[in-house]
Image (spheres, grey):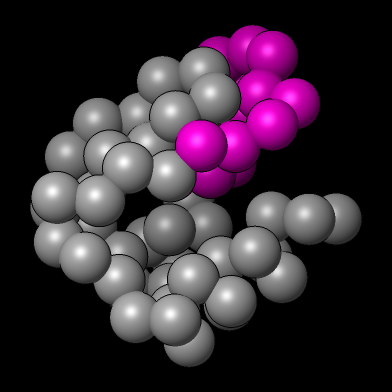
């Protein structure tokens, strides 16, 4: 498993947006809560970079 920490997640809507973006990138999240995402598998550096670019804006 891989845990990713995300800053500035402050509400349930943030969780929904992150979940939607993960699905678009083809990443499977086991658990999403404010500030933290637990993925079902390790992600590659390219997947991590794509996720960062998606979530930064």
Whether residue 6 is situated above or below residue 2 in the rendered picture: above
Q: Image point 52% across, 18% down: which residue?
A: 34
Residue 18 screen position, x and y as percent? 53, 44
Q: Image point 48% across, 87% down: which residue?
A: 46
Q: Which residues are magenta?
A: 5-19
Magenta residue check for 57: no
Quadrant of res 45 = bottom left
* Quarter in which the C terminus is drawn: bottom right
Magenta residue check for 10: yes
Residue 33 screen position, x and y as percent? 41, 20
Q: Nearer the viewer, residue 50 or 15?
A: 50
Query: Is residue 18 something that shows in the picture?
Result: yes
Residue 36 placement, left or right of 7: left
Whether residue 18 is situated above or below residue 22 in the rendered picture: above
Quadrant of res 6 = top right
Q: Nearer the viewer, residue 25 or 44?
A: 44
Residue 42 screen position, x and y as percent? 21, 65
Q: Image point 37% across, 61% down: which residue?
A: 23
**Count of picture labels:** 0
Residue 9 placement, left or right of 48: right
User: Which residue reaches farthest bottom?
Assistant: 46
Q: Nearer the viewer, residue 47 or 20?
A: 47
């Amino acid at each position: 498993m891989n845990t990713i920490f995300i800053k500035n997640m402050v509400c349930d809507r943030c969780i929904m947006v992150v979940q939607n973006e993960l699905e678009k990138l083809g990443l499977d999240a086991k658990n999403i809560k404010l500030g933290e995402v637990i993925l079902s598998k390790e992600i590659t550096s390219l997947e991590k970079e794509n996720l960062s670019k998606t979530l930064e804006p």
